[in-house]
């Protein structure tokens, strides 16, 4: 995880040096790193070393990890939040979270797990659950990200219900870093809408994914979804 943090910050530094748009980067934080290490100290050192604005970093922590020890998690999240880092609860709906704790956590983003998205085309129960999660999250002032969007029907449903950000192969597949940099430099659409886009660093702690994803960065392009730019749809490799 420390290597992932350092690699992500070095990419941000290199993109800044190259004059490319500074887009936020999202990093998965494993349960081991969150519960037993001091990620706030590690990340602060890496940010300082690379001269990176903390607001460009978003940490994703799964619901299961947060609920292993909610009281301790709330303290640690507050420390990270005080640094200016954005915080996301990942895989929401797959664990056993208490809504009481959810409102206590200083979160910015709620990510709806792909389990609730993959059958939206034909499962009314999943549609009902997604509506409820989107409504609850927005009521709490959280940005909503839907994972695993693979069909136009899923995309349109989530957009209609108020989903703000999406990721999935329908929108874009992951790109190698060099290809992403080329797109960012040459695509006027991305340059014009850079402030409206969000880039997620493709990192996963699961065995078998790390090596491949650490060489990628994501892309999101679909500003036509909402002309005022409030809805930003992204793609992520592990969706």
Image: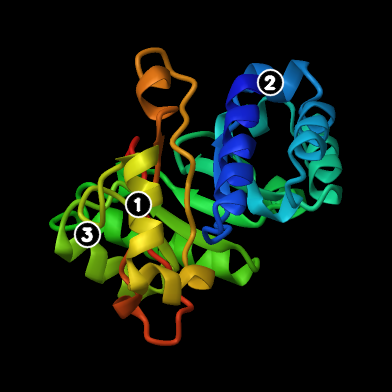
Which numbered disc, 1 or 3, marks the residue that appears first in the sequence? 3
Choose top left, top right, bottom left or bottom right for residue 27. top right
Which numbered disc, 2 or 3, marks the residue that appears first in the sequence? 2
Residue 229 image offset from top left, x and y in percent: 45, 80
> Which residue is more in the foreground, 212 or 125?
212
Tag on residue 124?
3
Residue holding disc 1: 182
CA gap, disc 1 to disc 3?
41 Å
Tag on residue 33?
2
- Specify whether 167 is left or right of 20: left
CA gap, disc 2 to disc 3?
37 Å
Tag on residue 208?
none
What is the crowding at mark 2: few (fewer than 14 residues within 10 Å), some, or many (at least 20)? few
Mark 2 or 3, closer to the camera: 2
Q: Residue at x 75, y 49 (%)?
A: 54
> Compared with residue 3, is residue 52 higher up or lower down, i.e. above or below?
below
């Amino acid at each position: 995880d420390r290597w992932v943090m350092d690699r992500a910050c070095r990419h941000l530094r290199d993109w800044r040096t190259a004059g490319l748009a500074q887009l936020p980067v999202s990093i998965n934080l494993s349960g081991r790193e969150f519960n037993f290490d001091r990620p706030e100290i590690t990340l602060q050192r890496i940010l300082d070393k690379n001269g990176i604005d903390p607001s460009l970093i978003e940490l994703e922590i799964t619901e299961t990890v947060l609920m292993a020890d909610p009281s301790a998690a709330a303290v640690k999240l507050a420390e990270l939040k005080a640094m200016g880092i954005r915080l996301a609860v990942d895989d929401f709906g797959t664990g056993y979270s208490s809504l009481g704790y959810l409102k206590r956590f200083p979160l910015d983003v709620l990510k709806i797990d792909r389990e609730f998205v993959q059958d939206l085309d034909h499962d009314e129960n999943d549609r009902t659950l997604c509506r409820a999660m989107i409504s609850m999250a927005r009521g709490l002032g959280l940005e909503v990200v839907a994972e695993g969007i693979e069909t136009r029907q899923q995309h349109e449903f989530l957009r209609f219900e108020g989903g703000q950000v999406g990721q999935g192969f329908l929108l874009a597949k992951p790109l190698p870093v060099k290809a992403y940099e080329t797109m960012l430099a040459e695509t006027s659409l991305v340059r014009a809408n850079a402030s409206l886009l969000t880039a997620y660093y493709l990192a996963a702690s699961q065995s078998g994914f790390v090596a491949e994803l650490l060489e990628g960065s994501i892309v999101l392009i679909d500003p036509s979804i909402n002309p005022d730019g409030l809805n930003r749809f992204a793609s992520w490799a592990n969706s």
